[in-house]
Amino acid sequence: MSREESIFTMAILINEDTAVMVQGISGKQGSLHAKYMIDYGVNIVAGVTPGKGDSEVNGVPVYHSPADVLKVHKSIDAALIMVPASAVLKAGREAILQIIPLVVIITEHVPVHDAIKLKSLAEEYGVTLVGPNTIGLISPGKCKIGVMPANLYSEGQVGVISRSGTMTHEISSALTRNMIGQSTCIGIGGDSVTGLDFTGALKMFLADEETKIIVLIGEIGGFYEEQAALYLSRVNYPKPVYAFIGGKLAPRGRKMGHAGALISADSGTAKAKARALSRAGVLVKDTVKELIESIAKGG
Amino acid sequence: MFLTENESKLILKEYGIDIPSGLVVSDINYMERAAAGLIGPVAIKALVASGGRGKKNGIRFANNPVEAVQEGSLLLNKELAGQKVTAVLVEEKITIQQELYLGVTIDFAKSKPLILFCTAGGVDIEETEGIINKLYFDLLKPVQFNCLVDFVSNSDLQECYVKKVAEIIDRLIAIFCDYDALTVEINPLVITSKEEIIAVDAKIVTDDAAYFRQKRLKGPGVDRNLHPLEKEAEEAGLSLVLLSGGGEIGLICGGAGLGMATMDIIAHYGGKTANFLDTGGGLSVEKMARALQIVLQVPEIKGILVNVFGGINNCLNVARGIAAVIDDSNKNFLRVPIVVKMQGHFQEEGWTLLKQYPSVVVIKEGCIDDAAEILLSLIKT
């Protein structure tokens, strides 16, 4: 599709027609999650595994490179990258250079320099980069590009944006149990350098008619929550935004699991982030139960 | 990984940046000879990964080899900033005319690398009263030398030193890129009384995630300050943080964000978490079993909460890991209740497997709040 058309479908990033290319499809995780995606009805058009072009995985033709895929399949809307960390830079660069509009990197422990290069390249080519170190994204009932267990998600009007993969499952599954469905849930990833951030996703949800309520799931480390607070305080954001910020009890100076979760000299605590968002009009809740109850009442 | 001052300086030297003459001493018996081999007074610096050593008396000076032994003894094998000083760097003391600050680092608010330069160095960069000049650059495009010259000229540095400092920045960028550094810093970069430019202190921090292509380095930084249980966890590929102040709940979570949220919510309901543990993705049966074995060793816990999703992980593997530990254990174990909140891929199979263990309570539907409340009520009874 043309760049202009793709911008419109990018409002929620993925839908029933999204044609997906899976890089790393021949690996254990790649083939397993490709299968789950196919079972979900996702249109996986091709896979990429260097050196295994001309093979097949779960009925999907495998090619040597994204360039080879594009020679045969004229239109790829999204690339899902599940290759080892040492191969992410190459896989990501090749997908971006083919101007595939959405590139999702699941892989964790990607070197920071590589993430910086990919983010810069994606911006230069007008590609939406999601991740690295993410579960991916899902528009329940339509499409999923990632590793989330789809049974926990249901179709509806809440947009979810999260730095934590499993917290996306936690909050989305709680919403689902309470008959509150989700429009699109996006894991932006847990690293210090990621493609899409909260602000970018908020802008996309703003333009999307299906999304009526947004939930931000943040945590200690980095600047995304503060940047989102700045954005929200400057625009008259017409949809209610809720948030849960984890890490109130995280000790200073200790890395909590993934690379981005660290309170350092210049990056915020959970309390500071919650305060910044609150001041910008975000409804910040302290527990999952409180969050769900608020959304159920507030509508 | 935090390289020591000495390791950092050797890299600078390799890239053509002048450093003071010096050597590493780890045995006080060699101190006198080491100091005697250097010309004039010496500086003796504790080799620890710690900022602000000067303020903590981690840097001492001696006018002669005998004094060097006295000063060195105050540092070697003593504690400094929570670390044991196993070695010191003994180097010629530099006569300082001016101290500059030079660094290449990453602005995580913009996800871009940048060069920092200040003509008032020698102090914590956040505390300097000088102007900090910044130049952002692109990892995908080499920085033109004349840009560096312009950048340095745009400060109050004397004209005669501009080109040389620009050359040093060029070398620092090369080190930054070649070593997958998060920070490369020279503070102070000294203009000596003889008008030479010497890196009197250096700090390089590298990205552990890039270790697979950085074999010159000794290894991904194993934090020397970890508690033995935390080290054990790290070796098993788990991320364990023991929390201070006691705590009755041992935690195992699939995901750092989930772990932190669980800690916060447990506190909301009046409980206290003893440890954070992130299993990470790609959880095997063995790794899950290790996680449980390790958390069982956390002192004073009265209950365990396992909070995982089968997304990239698999609920059946989680169940098998727990089962393996229970099957293997003695009677003491059964006194600690375990609440397992688990949903996602292979959930039915995992739930079924855990049904046969009476000390395990499985939550099939329910959020963190529910799990916390149930475990806390089990602990109280």
Image: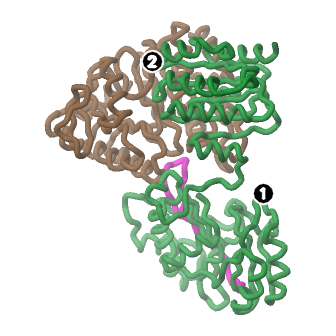
Amino acid beneath label 1 = Gly
Report the side of A74 relative to A17 (left or right).
left
Q: Is residue B113 magenta?
A: yes
Residue B226 place in picture, x, y as percent: 70, 49
Q: Colour of chain B?
A: green
Residue pictured at 55% horizontal, 55% vertical: B220
Question: In the rendered structure, are the residues bearing label 1 and label 2 in contact, judged by CB atoms less than 8 Å apart?
Answer: no
- Vertical side of A187 occupied by B84: above or below: below
Image quarter of the C terminus of chain A: top right
Q: Colour of chain A?
A: brown
Magenta range is: B93-117
Subunit of label 1 = B
Q: Residues within 10 Å of mark 1 (few under 14, many from 20)?
A: few
The quadrant in which residue A107 appears is: top left
- Residue A75 vs residue A62, the one in the foreground: A62
- Residue A4 vs residue A155, the one in the foreground: A155
The quadrant in which residue B224 appears is: bottom right
Residue B298 place in picture, x, y as percent: 74, 35
- Vertical side of B51 occupied by A287: above or below: above
Whether residue A37 is visible to the viewer of this picture, yes or no, is yes
- Give the labeled residue for mark 2: A211
Q: Name the mark nearer the viewer: 1 or 2.
A: 1
Disc 1 is placed on an element classified as: loop
Q: Is residue B106 magenta?
A: yes
- Vertical side of B116 occupied by A158: above or below: above
